[in-house]
Image: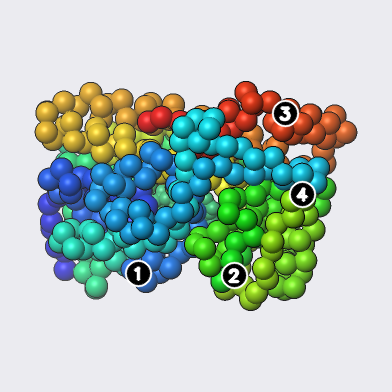
């Protein structure tokens, strides 16, 4: 049986991009329906990003979902780079007047879902076989299967917020699409543990054995990452080996106080830079990981999804409230201008801090010189800080 429904904006994906867009539109009285392939439990349990730019926090405030974030989020004035056995502090507040906030993506997702449901906004969980139709017309449609029936959603616009593995990107004509990609020859082993963080701020460590990152989710929950080879398996990394390796790679002055304990989550993720252009076609707009991926070194993935949503929500609000479609027409180019800068920064941080496979002696010297320069130059530290806290929207 087929069921037909009408909405203003059809949103594919209940990740941060789709949920934040739905919420911002809702605040401005614009209807949307969110279609999500997974269950609510699955989406709320997904452990991913955790460092928020000030602009992302402002957007969450605007969306009316920042009450818990203000209470529980950890505001960080800086971060440290450990290199050559010493710690170099990058003072974000002094260098840029801005800070970042540590608050888990899982918590943002929970806050956005709760606000959406409290406002009566629809999220269709377990929407299967979502397909896009007529995106070049003024009445694009989405079809999907749910609870044993086929549904049709007729929209004014479709927002493809369905992540890297979603269906939206491939709905753009292949002849107009171009992909830019770098796959790095290493990955990140990430762990969560209910132990106190080893430092009050993040420590990014460059070490001969490979990169490590000491991060946190709360004053009692730590998040650590270790650069690993792509063919390594989780079985290769029992907890004892992880803590041992972290102690070696984070060995610096003053020494971080690493508390060990059982890991509660462990995963290995490959690192990739990816941009697909254009980010719009007809009445379809892509936002977030559906259009681009960054390696997590610069903490930009979630923040880029948020800045795309900033531009897209502004464009849709101007369309509905002022009958002005100029921002909609410009959306892709506007978003991409910021995406490319974040791609550059994430690629640079990754190249600066990781052990480079097959690096020639010249590349190794360049990496060392760059780290020395960063340690000694206020200008270099300002450039890092300005990008890390987030370029303006
Ligand atoms: C393992 C991992 C670790 C990460 N760690 C960090 C980090 O430390 N720091 C950082 O900044 N970034 C990190 N990221 C990146 C960050 O999490 C993403 O950039 C962010 O989630 C992007 O949000 P999004 O809404 O665009 O996409 P997603 O979060 O991927 O959301 C897409 C949603 O669409 C749904 N979906 C997919 N296909 C369909 C379909 N066909 N139909 C309907 N729904 C569909 C998915 O189930 C998902 O809920 C990490 C990513 C991963 C995968």
Q: Nearer the viewer, mark 1 or mark 3?
A: 3
Marks 3/2: CA–CA distance: 33 Å
| Left or right, residue 281 beside residue 303 | left
Residue 60 pos. (x, y %):
31, 48
- Residue 39 disc label: 1
Pointer 1 residue Cβ closer than 8 Å to ligand 1 = no
| Left or right, residue 52 beside residue 186 | left
Q: Quadrant of residue 263?
A: bottom right
Q: Residue furthest right?
A: 361
Marks 3/4: CA–CA distance: 17 Å
Circle 2/circle 4 CB separation < 8 Å: no
| Left or right, residue 154 beside residue 214 | left
Q: Earlier in the sequence, mark 2 or mark 4?
A: 2
| Residue at numbered disc 2 | 195
Looking at this view, is 158 or 382 the one in front?
Answer: 382
Q: Nearer the viewer, mark 1 or mark 4?
A: 4
Scheme of image coloration: rainbow
> How busy is the neighbourhood of tag 1: few (under 14 within 10 Å), some, or many (20 plus)?
few
Q: Earlier in the sequence, mark 1 or mark 3?
A: 1
| Residue at numbered disc 3 | 376
Q: Nearer the viewer, mark 1 or mark 2?
A: 2
């Amino acid at each position: 049986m087929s069921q037909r429904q009408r909405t203003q904006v059809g949103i594919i994906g209940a990740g941060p991009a789709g949920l934040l867009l739905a919420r911002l539109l809702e605040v401005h009285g614009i209807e949307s329906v969110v279609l999500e392939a997974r269950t609510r439990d699955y989406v709320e349990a997904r452990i991913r990003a955790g460092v928020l730019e000030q602009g992302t926090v402002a957007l969450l405030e605007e969306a009316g979902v920042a009450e818990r974030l203000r209470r529980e989020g950890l505001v960080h004035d800086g971060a440290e780079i450990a290199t050559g056995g010493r710690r170099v502090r990058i003072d974000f507040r002094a260098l840029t007047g801005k800070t970042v906030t540590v608050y888990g993506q899982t918590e943002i997702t929970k806050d956005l879902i709760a606000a959406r449901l409290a406002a009566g906004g629809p999220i269709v969980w377990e929407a299967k076989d979502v397909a896009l139709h007529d995106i070049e017309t003024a009445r694009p449609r989405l079809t999907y299967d749910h609870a044993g029936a086929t549904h049709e959603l007729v929209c004014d616009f479709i927002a493809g917020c369905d992540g890297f593995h979603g269906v939206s990107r491939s709905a753009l004509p292949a002849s107009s699409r171009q992909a830019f990609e770098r796959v790095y020859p290493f990955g990140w082993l990430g762990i969560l543990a209910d132990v106190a963080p080893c430092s009050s701020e993040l420590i990014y460590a460059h070490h001969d054995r490979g990169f490590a990152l000491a991060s946190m989710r709360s004053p009692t929950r730590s998040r650590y990452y270790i650069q690993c080879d792509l063919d390594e398996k989780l079985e290769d990394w029992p907890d004892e080996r992880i803590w041992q390796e972290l102690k070696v790679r984070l060995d610096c002055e003053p020494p971080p106080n690493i508390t060990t304990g059982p890991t509660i989550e462990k995963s290995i993720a490959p690192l990739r830079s990816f941009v697909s252009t254009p980010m719009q076609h007809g009445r379809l707009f892509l936002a977030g990981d559906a259009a681009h991926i960054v390696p997590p070194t610069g903490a930009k993935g979630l923040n880029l999804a948020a800045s795309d949503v900033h531009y897209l929500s502004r464009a849709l609000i101007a369309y509905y409230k002022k009958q002005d479609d100029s921002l909609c027409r410009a959306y892709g180019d506007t978003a991409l201008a910021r995406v490319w800068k974040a791609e550059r920064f994430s690629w640079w941080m990754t190249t600066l801090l990781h052990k480079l496979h097959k690096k020639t002696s010249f590349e190794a010297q360049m990496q060392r010189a760059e780290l020395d320069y960063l340690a000694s130059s206020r200008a270099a530290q300002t450039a890092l800080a300005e990008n890390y806290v987030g370029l303006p929207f």
